[in-house]
Image (cartoon, rainbow, N blue to C red):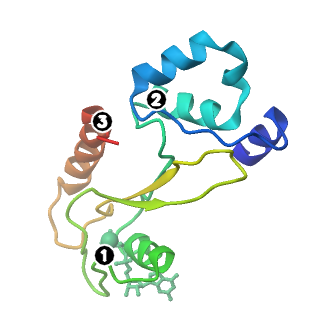
Amino acid sequence: MLQSCLRNLIPNPRMVDIPTIPSELVAMVQGDPDSAKHPGYYMAQRSVSARRSPNNPTILLVGMSGAGKSTTINSLFSSKICATGNNKSVTKDVTEFYVNIPSKRCGINNLKLSIIDTPGFGDSNGEPKSDAKHAVCMKRFFEVGCPG
Ligand SMILES: Nc1nc2c(ncn2[C@@H]2O[C@H](COP(=O)(O)OP(=O)(O)OP(=O)(O)O)[C@@H](O)[C@H]2O)c(=O)[nH]1
Ligand SMILES: [Mg+2]
């Protein structure tokens, strides 16, 4: 979906650097309305409206405990950076990981992908209110914002 949106904007976009400070991005796009059509600036504006850093698209992993969220991150990074477990809930905190990706397709030089691991729902540790606590933690994580 996002890929087709981006393709419809500019087929071979020029490479740009996305300002890491949201107000600089807004000033840039307002000063040059054509730049708003560039896929990089388009994505950056969407990130800012979701209260995230302009130059890092985000993958948020949410699901039942034991679904394989942390295992997925370890696979993506080819490294055991997250603890995983068989019989009981493992991840206790919302944790964000970054990877720099040279993304010619989107026309962005300084793109940084962010992947967020979260504690699973249906906690096996028997804490009845843990789903609600995890949901509040995730909401808070996005409200506080991303340092970039
Ligand atoms: N067969 C199979 N096992 C998987 C897969 N993904 C994860 N597992 C196993 O399932 C278990 C739990 O995986 P985790 O990655 O810890 O699950 P999680 O979603 O992070 O769980 P919480 O941290 O408790 O929320 C581990 O033993 C993994 O090896 C998968 O795609 N296939
Ligand atoms: Mg986990």
Q: How many marks?
A: 3
**From what the image shows, is residue 114 above or below residue 122?**
above
Q: Quarter of the image holding residue 147?
A: top left
Where disc 1 sits, the SS reads loop
**Ligand 1 position by quadrant:** bottom left
Which of the numbered marks, if any, corresponds to residue 145? 3
Residue drawn at x 68%, y 46% is: 106
Closer to the N terminus: mark 3 or mark 2? 2
Disc 3 to disc 2, how far (Cα)?
10 Å
Task: Specify the amino acid type for callout 3.
Answer: Gly
Write down the residue under mark 2: 48
Q: Nearer the viewer, residue 113 or 119?
A: 113
Q: Residues within 10 Å of mark 3 (few under 14, many from 20)?
A: few
**From what the image shows, is residue 132 above or below residue 79?**
above
Instruction: Please indicate whether residue 71 sits to the left or right of residue 138 in the image.
Output: right
Confirm if mark 1 falls within 8 A of ligand 2.
yes
Write down the residue under mark 1: 82
Instruction: Please indicate whether residue 43 sits to the left or right of residue 20 in the image.
Output: right
Task: Specify the amino acid type for callout 2.
Answer: Val
